[in-house]
Image: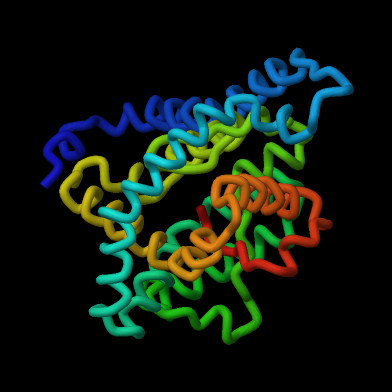
Amino acid sequence: MNTEQGLTPPAHAPARGRAAVRRAARPLLLALLLLGATGCATVPAEQDEASAYDPFEPLNRKVFAFNQATDRVLLRPLARGYDRFVPDPVKTGVGNFFDNLSAPIWVLNHLLQGNPGDAARQTGRFLMNSTFGLGGVLDPASRNGLPENTARFDQTFGKWGIPSGPFIMVPFLGPNTPRSAVGWYARLQTDVIWNRLEDNRSLRDKLTVLQFVELRHRLLRFDRMIDEAPDPYIFVRESYRQRMEFEIRGDVDLEEEFDFDDDP
C-alpha cells in the first residue's frame, strides 16, 4: 500500500500536474538545444559522407565488438531459450502487451508530427486492446481495421528537421545518435512502466527485463544476416541509418529488403 498517496492532501494535485507538464516538456527543450548544437557544426564538402556520419568509427568498432561478445554470451542465449521453451501463444501475448503499453507514446508522437488522424486511430486501438484485448495481451484492434502504426520521438525530431548528429555505438544499447539519445530520454519520461510503477520497483524491474528479452527475441531473425555480412559493423550502421531515414522520409529502398518494424 502506498502510504504517501493516502497522506497527500488534494491541494497538492495542481503542483503534481505542473511537475508532470515540466517533465514532459524537458525532452522537447533538449531537442531544441540539440538542433542548435548540431546546426553549428560544419563538415568540409570534400569529406567522405560515411566519415562525416561516423567520425568515431575506431572507437565505435571497439564498442561494437564488446556488444557482440556480450550478446553472444548473455542476451542471445536468453532470447533463444525464450524462443525455444515459451509457447508461441504466450510469446505473442507478451509482445502484444508491451506494444500496447507503447501505444500512448505513439499517439503523442503522431500529434507532435501533425497527424491527428493517426493519433485518433492509435488511441482507438489502445482502448480496444486494453479492454476487449485483456490489457493488451490480445489484439482485436488489428482484426477490426485498426492496425499498429508506430511513431517514435527520434522520428518526430527528424521530421522537425533536427539533424541526427554523429553515429555513436553505445555499450549494451547498440546503435545511437545524439538525436536518438534525446528520443530515448523522452520515451523514458513518458513510458507507462517507468512512470506508473515507481512505487512498485520490483514489478517494474521484472517487466523491464522481460521487455528486453522479448525485444531481443524479435531480433533473432537478424542474427544470421549480421553474422554473414562481410563487415557486420558497417551492416548494422547502415541498416540503422537507412531505417531512420525511411521512418522520417519514407523513400529509402533498404526498407523493401529488410523488415525494420520492431521498436528499438
Instruction: Point out residue 9 in the picture as x, y percentages from the top left corner.
Output: 24, 30
| Residue under the point 71% across and 51% down | 242
Question: In screen coordinates, is 172 left or right of 73?
Answer: right
Residue 108 appears in the rendering: no
Residue 244 appears in the rendering: yes
Q: In this rendered view, identify the residue nearer to me: 220 or 196.
A: 220
Instruction: Point out residue 91 in the picture as x, y percentages from the top left corner.
Output: 35, 76
The tally of labels here is: 0
Q: Quadrant of residue 218?
A: bottom left
| Residue under the point 65% across and 81% down | 145
Question: In screen coordinates, is 7 left or right of 155?
Answer: left
Instruction: Point out residue 38 in the picture as x, y percentages from the top left corner.
Output: 71, 20
| Residue under the point 68% across and 43% down | 156
Q: Quadrant of residue 8?
A: top left
Instruction: Point out residue 141 in the picture as x, y percentages from the top left corner.
Output: 55, 79
Q: How is the image coloured?
A: rainbow
Q: In this rendered view, identify the residue nearer to me: 14 or 197.
A: 197
Relative to 155, residue 131 above or below: below
Question: In screen coordinates, is 153 left or right of 204?
Answer: right
Q: In this rendered view, identify the residue nearer to me: 234 or 220.
A: 234
Question: In screen coordinates, is 199 left or right of 192?
Answer: left
Residue at the limit of the structure toward the top, as seen here: 40
Relative to 51, residue 232 above or below: below
Q: Quadrant of residue 27?
A: top right
| Residue under the point 58% across and 30% down | 57
